[in-house]
Image: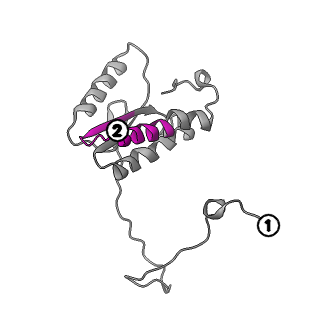
Amino acid sequence: MTPSDPADVGELSLETAQARGFYSLLYLAQALGKHGTTGPVQIVVVANGIQPLTDSDRFVPEKTTLLGPCTVIPQEYPHIRCRSIDIVLPEADSRAAARLVEQLLAELIAPLAEPMVAYRGRQRWVRDVAPLHLDAPAGAHSRLREGGVYLITGGLGAVAGGPCRK
């Protein structure tokens, strides 16, 4: 969590954001794995600034790296459930703060909760993925066959094989 007012945050470096988010989750999952925990474990990450839903949302891209471990940890450790809840910090001791506490408590005890949730005031947002069918332009002939197998190469730059050189 960081203050809602950018003036109170200062510059949040990528390294600091990854240490507090990405790596803390990664190391926690690794420690649970080494400990031999096999019973169900639930990790819930509550953060602000990771899901830009409206134009007025303060988005902090450096913090979004924590969404990676939230997605991958349950795949690597099937007994660990990891969820993220994005919030906007209301004024302390306000009606909105009391409502947010109620929303978070309800979210924490929900038996079948979504892995990514965002709260904006009274609204609860969840990630939804749906297939999108794109029609080919008129007269276009696709080189792809239905059920075909394809190898896609290139376009990864330094990610695929180290530094790019001229």
**x, y (%) of residue 137?**
48, 79
**Residue type pointed to by label 2:** His
Name the side, left or right, on which 18 lies relative to 73: right
Residue for badge 1: 166
Name the side, left or right, on which 101 lies relative to 53: left
Determine if the magenta segment contains residue 11.
no
**Residue shown at the point (38%, 83%) measured from the top left:** 146
Residue for badge 2: 35
- Give residue 164's quadrant in the image: bottom right
Q: Which residues are magenta?
A: 23-45
Residue at disc 1, secondary structure: loop
Can residue 46 be seen from the camera position used here? yes
Can residue 52 be seen from the camera position used here? no
How far apart in space, not on screen, are marks 1 and 2 (Cα)?
47 Å
Observer-nearest of 119 and 139: 119
- Give residue 6's quadrant in the image: top right
